[in-house]
Amino acid sequence: AYEYNLNEAMVLCDEAKTALQSYIAGMKLPKTVVRTVTGVPDVSGESFIADTVSSDGKSEKRPVFYVGYGHWENDDMEDYRAMGVNLIQYEIGPEHILKKASDEEIAAGKLFTVDTEKLKEVREVFERAEDCGVSIVFLTAMHYFPEFLYEYDPTIINGGKVSDFPNFTPYNPTHPVVLDTFNQFLDAIIPVIKDYKSLNSICISNEPVFTA
């Protein structure tokens, strides 16, 4: 299997090199490239339908594929469209947005303060994606959970240990403290991202594991 993949990759590289040399020499016209326009797609049957613009200037709404990365580097976003990439997954979890309140506030029943600087960073990512013509699948990464809550109420741990893997969501997702944390996180993050054209969709959870 390895040799087959390597041989096929070499064939494709040779074909690409020959085609590029022909384009540069003016002996062959490059194929028309169709790229998505940043925006929320429609869904028809099993297809995404989105606005597109082709390299010859033609605009149309048509079926598209979204291709991209789950783990990506900010520094490369401006190059993605040239690479054929039109989608990234961006993940933010409760521990990134909800910071531990002061001891006095916790004693009064307020567990969190909202990190406005992190929300500003989130806005910048979505704005940059719009400028770059890249869509975002936003992952509400609930496995990034505020660790101080495990001490605040040990009953949320659900019989697991914080360090267990792959049990990287050791809490009981139906526990009132956990549900309240989720709600406060979503109340903080959704209004920030909901109106950006670069928002393609929302991924609710990453590899959820419930061990109760």
Image (cartoon, rainbow, N blue to C red):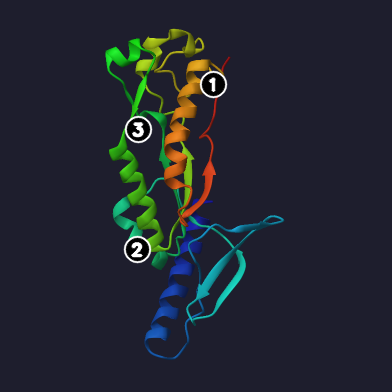
For the residue labelled by badge 3, is the local secondary structure a helix, a strand or a loop?
helix
Is residue 164 left or right of 45 when viewed as pictured?
left
Residue under the image location 36 percent in, 33 percent down:
97
Q: Between residues 102 and 46, which one lies in front from this camera angle?
A: 102
Residues 100 and 66: in front is 100
Q: What residue type is labelled 2?
A: Asp
Q: In terms of depth relative to the viewer, which is nearer, 76 or 173?
A: 173
Give the structural element (helix, strand or loop) at label 1: loop
Q: Which amino acid does label 3 sit on?
A: His
Q: Is mark 2 on a helix, strand or loop?
A: helix
Q: Residue 96 carries which label?
A: 3
Which of the two residues, 28 or 177, is positioned nearer the viewer here?
177
For the question of whether residue 130 can be seen, the reply is: yes
Q: How far apart are marks 2 and 3 (CA)?
A: 27 Å
Residue in the image at 43% along x and 8% along y: 154
Taking the spot 42% from the left edge, 10% from the top edge, the residue there is: 153
Residue farthest toward the right in the current orientation of the protein:
45
The x and y percentages for residue 42 are: 62, 58
Of badges 2 and 3, the one in the foreground is: 3
Q: How far apart are marks 1 and 2 (CA)?
A: 39 Å
Q: In this view, does 183 lie above or below 139?
A: above
Badge 2: few (under 14), some or many (20 or more) residues near its Cα, within 10 Å? few
The residue labelled by disc 2 is 79
Crowdedness of circle 1 by 10 Å Cα count: few (<14), some, many (20+)?
A: some
Task: State how far apart marks 1 and 3 are (Cα).
Answer: 18 Å
Q: Image height check: is 200 above or below 109? A: below
Count of numbered marks: 3
Residue 209: % across, % down = 55, 25
**Where residue 173 is drawn, which disc sits there?**
1
Q: Is residue 190 above or below residue 95?
A: below
Report the residue at 46% width, 60% height from top: 86
**Which quadrant would the C terminus be assigned to in this image?**
top right
